[in-house]
Image (cartoon, rainbow, N blue to C red):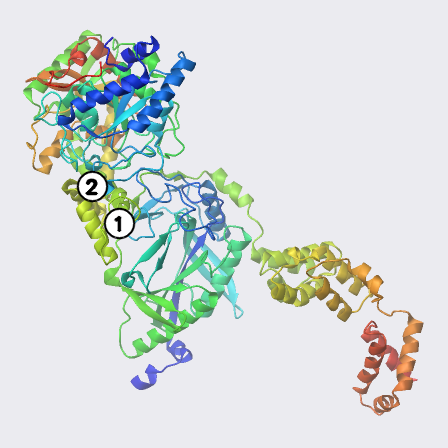
Amino acid sequence: MSSDTVAGLGARLRRGETDPAELAGRARGALESIADLHPVLRYTDDLAERQARRAARMLAESPATAGPLCGIPFAYKDVLCVEGVETSAGSKILQGFIPPYTGTALGRLLDAGAVPVAVTNCDEFAMGSSNENSAYGPVGNPWDGSRVPGGSSGGSAAVVAAGAVPFSLGTDTGGSIRQPASFCGVAGFKPTYGRVSRYGLIAFASSLDQIGPFARSVDDVASVFTAIAGHDPRDSTSSPTAVEPVGEQLGKGVAGLRLGIPREYMAEGLEPGVLSAVQAAFALLEKLGATLEEVSLPSTEAALSTYYIIAPAECSANLARMDGVRFGLHIDRPSLTDTYLETRGQGFGPEVKRRIMLGTYALSSGYYDAYYRQAQKVRTLIAEEFDRAFEKVDALVCPTSPIVAFPKGAKSDPLSMYLCDVLTLPVNLAGLPGISVPCGLSEGLPVGLQVIGPRLQDARVLRVARAYEQATAWHTQTAPPRAGAGRLA
Amino acid sequence: MTTASAVSTLEQVLERYEPVIGLEVHGQLLTRSKMFCGCSADYIGSPPNSNTCPVCLGLPGVLPVINRVAVEYVVRTALALNCEIPEDSKFDRKNYFYPDLPKGYQISQWDMPLSRNGHLTFTVDGEEVRCGITRVHLEEDTGTLQHAGDILQQARSSVVDLNRAGVPLMEIVGEPDLRGSEQAREYLVRLRQILVYIGVNDGNLEQGSFRCDANISLRRRGETGLGAKVEVKNMNSFRAVQRALDFEIVRQGRLLDQGATIPQETRGWVEAKGATISQRSKEYAHDYRYFPEPDLPPLHLGADFVERVRAGLPELPQQLVARLQREHGLSAYDAAILSAEREDARAFEALVAAGVPAKAAANWLMGEVARLSRETRVAIQRSGLGVEGLAALITLVEGGSINGSTAKELLEELYLPGGDPAALVGERGLAQVSDQAELERLVDAAIAQNPEAVADFRGGREQALQRLVGGVMKATQGRADARAVSSLLRERLAR
């Protein structure tokens, strides 16, 4: 058991070899030592101190019932709200915004005794695939600081990959957990839409957003998922179905499972190193007893354009509340209209503006039917194709990203950036659970294997991913040591 | 002709043109909490922005949760207005920027409202009017703004109060079936009455819990097409609605007479000027970019739910009017007046249940009691006397124990403080002089003391009798039954 996993640290806490405050302090030190990568936007020292005391009390009072996350330090993406801690969504427009409330997922982690130590950098309003759209500067990939960590949850992926914290929270709207997990060589899980409450998540695209964990093992991902999943009366889109206990399925292996490989996901555009790593993973899964077969998701090629109508349409409304009237940036001008224009003009970055404009256009009178309504129809089609595939197979396996981490600045035109998510965003359109786990290196950079399951079959996805992970050593590979960089353990 | 038409009166315009009017009514629902959060829906009187939470402030990261009671109230309203209730409905976002709209969009309903295709029938000048109800849907109210200056665009500064933001609001869209300001007014009166009856709205136009916008166009009599419609806003009384519509009829009629076309626009009623002024032309109309609210799953109303709401519908005004006539023999006029406010009808029924004859109960309630409740601003139910006391009082009159004028005085005296009328009658010796021998003695005394009046009466001057009656009433300090006195006098003088 690795000493920098949730499970490993939990064991040490229970043996009295360390305590929550010490772990939080060490995590903070480790994060500071990678400050050059810029994955952290701010530290949550006061909250960390309070939570560490709370966790210590929980461990002292009843070590048996304190859950696996009790006393474990973590970091969370700058789009999640905790009372009293600034959340800026990686944007100038929310600089200084301090939520007066705590979101559900984070509230559940706090109740489980987990100790937040830092808020992580991300693309502005979670819009991007490289973390280069953050208003506070890009994040470097721990494997190669000149490369991107992926996005939009780039900071959350980087801090886990660097070994500074054992887990973190991110959000995934079109691949924003799985793609950076793939780029940084860690496990990243997007649960079924509606499985984790979105209350307290600053919305990008409400019908696609989902909160999920990054960790260094599937077991740890499962622990975090178990803590944050479940119905929330504050989120009307959260599923009322009881969460299936993950632990019961997790160790069952893949023997006898039918796994599908979507033909369209193996098409042109895959880097050779990615292709060979993923094919090796398929072979291993077969060796572990799974049956692999090709399946077809014919509407895949329409997914990207569908996504880039629905997500911007929703974001154009979701971001309207950023108007400078009640919170965040306010640029005072004599007229109301100019105040709106200046505040939003200066507060939003170029990618956010692009998407607001795209969405506004797609919803406007005379274009709604051609764009938004059409996109919703295609979305239904995509979901139905997944449903049909899952009549034949138990889960799908494929690459997470067609490419490995690219150098900062390499993708300057928006379309080539959008193409990074071509293998992940159909999963969001269909509301399915998907995970990325490390499956090898290509030219020294991590490659991710994606496992996709039917709606609410989150446990099955984790089970397949864990079976693969346990049969390989990829998840134990860490980023090459960097000068001065410390690790938590 | 041009000069003449420029000064056409309302009547002259109406001779040539037929107004086509459709009303949109917004009614705040009397739920306990707001539409999508737990804040109180009763926001009046709270310090600015105190009745708020992250949800109704529209802070980043929060989500709406549907108030089920609000859905039930809209369904109740829709059923009372004879609407169809589709099983499936959904909420949509209506997008526009304004400081009183915290999220930058209003959660409303666009193409799948909670109800549609209803109607409201009522009578104006003996003619039955049937106004279609296009739809009743559910949305959220906005906050309120105060400007240092007349309007936001010219204000030096404005302050925002979000206490009202998120209060459940239903919109009742009427078909353009109304043909004049009187019909429009009556439609609103009837609609308001129904909403108050079924307990979903308090019907307060001044405070804006019941608000009305009107769409109005004119067409030449005999034509069936529709002219360009003008939307009129800012009317906060029934009278304002009627005046604004009459103003528009004249304004549009004169323009049409001059051969001008009516521009499609939004106009605001300015009470002080007695006129509407242009607010926004069609070119500046909003594109609200409606799309389905992704934070709320579609709403599925089971047939069970709708039937349960239907079964729980209270008696509606028209049903009550019919029943009062049928069960209590009231005239249509009396029944309508007594059921204008549900409370009055309740008082009436309580009086009848306490043994008061229906006609007497109706007369007292519509007469003296109505006057007192207006003057004191306290309804009989909440007065010290109460319905029970009133019943006791009327019973004294009906039983002949006291006369009408004594009863009126007692009512006035006891209305607010309350008290037992019978006890007071005994205490003060107010009982009507009903002892025949005593009455005869008084009548004889009056005859003896007023020979002139007696002579006049016998000479054929009927009015002279009143002088004699007056004498008896004076002698009894008003405690005699004037009619009995009068007939006794006739009897005596005829001998």
Q: Is residue B3 above or below residue A366?
A: below
Q: Is residue A328 above or below residue B212?
A: above
The residue at the point 23 percent across, 36 percent down is: A89
The crowding category of the residue bearing disc 2, from other C-alpha atoms within 10 Å (few below 14, some 14 to 19, many at least 20), is many
Q: Is residue B285 left or right of residue A422?
A: right
The crowding category of the residue bearing disc 1, from other C-alpha atoms within 10 Å (few below 14, some 14 to 19, many at least 20), is many
The CA distance from mark 1 to mark 2 is 26 Å
Q: Which residue is mark 2?
A: A92
Q: Is residue A61 left or right of residue A52?
A: right
Marks 1 & 2 on one chain: no
Chain hosting mark 2 = A
The answer to whether residue A433 is visible is: no
Q: Amino acid at mark 2?
A: Lys
Out of B188 and A214, give the one closest to the viewer.
Answer: A214
The residue at the point 13 percent across, 33 percent down is: A132
Query: Residue A237 location in percent, x, y?
Result: 35, 33
Q: Quadrant of the N terminus of chain A?
A: top left
Q: Amino acid at mark 1?
A: Arg
Q: Is residue B477 left or right of residue A70?
A: right
Q: Is residue B246 above or below residue A259?
A: below
Chain hosting mark 1 = B
The residue at the point 75 percent across, 65 percent down is: B410
Residue B469, picture quadrant? bottom right
Residue B317, picture quadrant? bottom right
Out of B269 and B126, give the one closest to the viewer.
Answer: B269
Query: Residue B356 location in percent, x, y?
Result: 74, 59
Q: Quadrant of the C terminus of chain A?
A: top left
Q: Which residue is mark 1?
A: B289
Out of B184 and A291, give the one closest to the viewer.
Answer: B184
